[in-house]
Image (cartoon, rainbow, N blue to C red):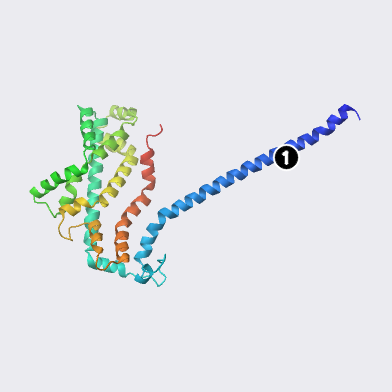
Amino acid sequence: MSLATTVAATKPAKLKSADKASSMSANLSHAKYIASKVIGILVLVILGIIVIFPVYYSFAGTLMQQQDIAANPPAIWPKHGVTWTNLTTAAQIIPLVRQYINSFGSTLIITVAQVITSTLVAYALVVLKVRGANVWFTLFLGTMMIPGESVIIPNYLTISSLGLRNTFLALILPFLASGFGIFMMYSFMKQFPMELVEAARIDGASNLRLLWSIVLPLSRPAIASLAIYTFLTHWNGFFWPLLVTETPEMQTIQIGITQLQSPDNFNPGLVMAGAVLAVIPTLLIVILGQRQIVRGLTAGSSK
C-alpha cells in the first residue's frame, strides 16, 4: 500500500474524532449552562420564600384560630377553619376606621405637598435659573445633613405654641417640604435637554406653559418615585404622631396597632391582624408602583 493511500485512509478517522470531541465539548458547555441556570433559579426561589413567608404568615395568622397559632409546631395555614375574630376584635379595641383616615389623609397631603414644592423649587433652580440658584441649592442640600431627631423638639414646641397639639394639622405641618425631594427633582431636571426648553421659549411659551407641557411630562418617573418614597416613609411614621396626638381618635394606625398588644393577655393573632391592616396600603403602593420606582431610579443613567 502506498503512502498516499495510507494518508487518505487516516484523514476520515481524524475528522470523525475531531467532530466527536467538538460535539462532546458543546454538550458539556450546554450542560454547564443548564446547571448554572437551574442553580440560579433555585437560589432565587429560596430567597423569595424567605422574603415572602413572613408576609404570608402574617395574613394567614390573621385568619387563624388561637389553637392553630399556639400549636407546637405552629400551623402554617388555618387547619381549624378561617376566623374573622382577630380583625373584628382589633376594630373594637381601637377606632380603626378613624385611624385609617388619619393615616391615609395625612400621608396623602404630605405626599402631594412635597411633590409640588420639590418640583417647583427644582424648576426655579434649574430651568428658570433664579439668582443665587447654587446658594439656594446648597442651603436645601444642607437641610439633609441635619438629623431629624434634632428638630423634633423645636417642631413640637412650635406646634404646642400654636395650639395645634392633637389636631390633624400637627400631623402634616412640619413635612410639607423636603430637602431630599428638592435634591431628587433638581438632580433629575439637571439632565433635561435644554434645547427643548429654549425651543419652547422661542415659540412663545410662558413659564407656566413650559412647566405644564414640557417639564412635568418629562419628570413623571422622578415624580412617581418621589411620591412613592414619601408615601411609604410617612405612612410608617410613628414617633411624631405619637408625640403630637393624645386621643385614639387623632392617632394614626401605626400607633393604634401597638395598643393591640397586652402583656396580660397576649394574642399573636390580634397583633398580626393589626400588622396586616397597617401593611396592606404599602404593599399595594409597591406592587402598583414598581415600574415607576424602577424607571425613576434608572432615569438619567443613559442618554
Residue 242: image location, x then y, percent:
19, 54
Quadrant housing residue 128: top left
Q: Is residue 225 in sight in this rendering?
A: yes
Q: Residue at x 30, y 45 (%)?
A: 229
* Residue that numbered label 1 is attached to: 20
Kindly state the secondary structure of the residue where label 1 is placed. helix
Q: Is residue 207 in sight in this rendering?
A: no
Quadrant housing residue 259: bottom left
Q: Residue at x 21, y 51 (%)?
A: 239
Residue 180: image location, x then y, percent:
26, 39
Find the residue positioned furthest to the right.
Answer: 1
Q: Residue at x 41, y 55 (%)?
A: 52
In this view, the residue in front, 244 or 112, is: 244
> Quadrant of the image for the C terminus?
top left
Q: Is residue 4 above or below residue 233?
A: above
Q: Amino acid at mark 1?
A: Lys
Using residue 113 as the reference point, say whether residue 224 is left or right of it. Answer: right
Judge the density around disc 1: few (<14), some (14-19), many (≥20) Cα neighbours within 10 Å: few
Quadrant housing residue 264: bottom left
> Quadrant of the image for the N terminus?
top right
